[in-house]
Amino acid sequence: MSKIAEVITRFPVFRKKALQTVVHYLLMILFAFLMFGLILFIAGKDPLQSYKDIFTSTLGSAYGFSEVIVAMIPMLITALAVALPFRVGLINIGGEGQLYIGAAFATFGALTFPNLPAWLLLPLMALLGMVGGALWAFIPGYLKSIGLVNETITSLLLNSVAPKIIGFLILGFWHAPRDTIRTPNFGTSALLPTFFGTRIHLGLVFGLGLLIVFWLVMKYTRWGLEMRAIGSNPQAAKRNGIPLSRYLVIIMCAGGAIAGLAGMVQVSGFYGTLFLNFSISLGFMGFMICWLAGGDPLGIVLMAFVVSVIYSGGNLLQLTRDLPFAVINILLAFTLFIVLARPAFFKGRKS
Amino acid sequence: MTLLSILGVLSSAIFSGTSLLFTTLGEVIDERAGIVNLGLEGVLLVSASSGFAVTYLSGNPYLGILVSILAGGLMNMILGYLVITRKANQLASGLALMFFGFGLSALIGKPFVGEKIHSLTRYVLPGTAGLPLLYTSLFKFDILIYLVIPAAILVWWLLYRTRWGLGVRAVGENADTAFASGRNPHLIRYQALFAGGMLVGLGAAHLTIAFTMNWTEYMTAGRGFIAVALVIFSKWHPLRAIAGALVFSGAVAFQLLLQSSGVQVSPFLLDTLPYILTLVVLIAWGGNRKHSAPGSLGRVYQGSE
């Protein structure tokens, strides 16, 4: 691998830093595809035909492409929910739980005030979702700020609690007349508007908008500077008069609020109802994407796109190749493994 | 509520708790060496599916168990390569391993969905042979259940009474110091991961070959994360892990009991009890240095070159 990269970077065109990064990422992803192809081959499927399926179904048509964007929306938001706390050195692995609680709060809004007009109900649901996620993140954030328990462990534990609270709420109070695992469909005023006749919804604007705000705040404001100071050396930041523990709690809650918004976006923009275990590891996926992108907003968009292509392609693999949908996780994992293992040339770029 | 139903619930708690305890013991070894394995869910699934497949094809459950154990060890080697050799982030690598396990197990297990196997032979608990047949049927356990407590003691002995265990704990506390005193942190971490993975594989084997006796996609349903929580609950100690697994499977049994006696408590809320209990225990021990995690847990050992 590193040999190939060396040869490629000899061409002057590829000397540009940004281009090099793109080439490196593409090479790594290509390698992941090769390995997954090998697995498909061993399983007795035709790898070339499978890849043709994956790409024509996702990037080959306007509809397929729109579905990729739809899949990308929650991942953008949950990745940001990890990226923000990471700037102050907090590891928020609880996105999954915060997303569930946010979805529950938003659902509460949708079911309690079905007669409100959309321009009032949707902001209310978004606000409720963010409050829910923030409350769920407050627990690990507060415990960390008073120096009791590490936020990684607590947010991980709370991930397992949140879906069960959803189950309790649905089964006990919210379920549809003839269904025990889901709520009734939301009224039309509780659904995020969709664009261009596709399933792409307003959540995309939320996601991209938040990423831009995040980038601006980090680069140009005093808060961004202070947060970077905390991230690189909390003790020094404290001695310079930055209110450390207040920052930790607020940033953790902000991360939770963002993840909660992702929950709201999923129930209001994508499903139009709340049901048991609706998040297919979206919180964890966001964590991976953020990690692969190094917390960089543009990187998050790119990685979320790649992951979404892989995931959307998995649907077709299931239909035409007679493979379980979960098999696509192998391709995802190979991509993750290779980026994590970071071949030597990738590391050398920095120096 | 009859005595019989209580015993029945207890018996099923023992069955479901066994795989949990094996898994927890595996994770105790990993974390004692300083490595958090968040991919337990994936390791369990791959071990379970491959063990089940081999049992079904060969008709020999013991061969299936052996394959499960090996699969567990090998899955952990992937994590080892990423976090030890390539020095990747442990949490992210663990989650990647989890996704890998979701996919690979679905692929391996697909031809075997809906198939049945002959389970492990079950032996009557000594001392209960004289009871009426209805009761003795509840006290018939397979060999893995009888082995789980000895396994916990063995892990304790390995970690606290052998040179190897001292090395593992030293590397987990402070890899640089361990290196300075002439140990090889990389090698020890690989060994610990392999040993831990084998135990996780044993847990998966019990789940699929002895307990459920079938394979369904994502059959572990969060057991991996429960085990991670139990390791914390048991303060990284193999003997306390027994108590942790008992508390957890006890809570599950308690919930079944309440349901059978008609008490109206949401099973979902009861399900959260073990996690909340773990959280409370963590807060109660918070800041107490003596009981905190291994010193270099989750940190990358950069090596001394």
Image (cartoon, rainbow, N blue to C red):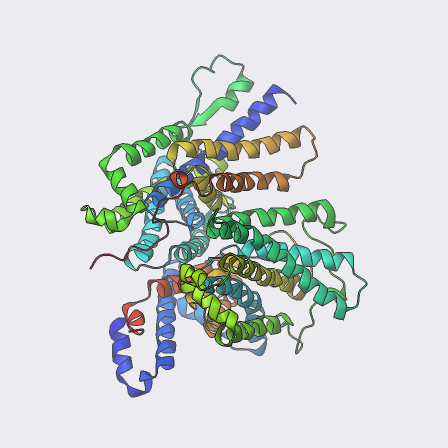
**Residue A225 placement, left or right of A340:** right
* Residue B118 visible somewhere in the drawing: no
Q: Residue furthest left?
A: B182
Q: Is residue B47 above or below residue A202?
A: above
**The C terminus of chain B, quarter of image:** bottom left
Q: Residue furthest bottom?
A: A12
The residue shown at (73%, 64%) is: A190
Q: Is residue A105 above or below residue B244?
A: below
**Rendered position, A42 above or below B262:** below
A66 and B174: which one is in front?
Answer: B174
Residue A220 screen position, x and y as percent: 50, 77
| Foreground of the two, B28 or B142 | B28
The x, y position of residue A80, in whole percent, is 52, 66
Q: Is residue A170 visible?
A: yes
Quadrant where the image shows the N terminus of chain B: top right
* Residue sticking out furthest to the right: A115
- Residue toward you, A103 or B300: B300
- Image coords of residue B167 (percent x, y): 25, 42
Identified at 57% across, 46% down, the residue is A161
Q: Quadrant of residue A341?
A: bottom left
Q: Give the residue drawn at x 42%, y 42%.
A: B52
- Where residue B275 appears, x then y in whole percent? 54, 42
How many badges with numbers are in the image?
A: 0
Query: Is residue B35 found left or right of A106 in the rendered image?
Result: left
Residue drawn where x is 54% and y is 57% of the image: A249
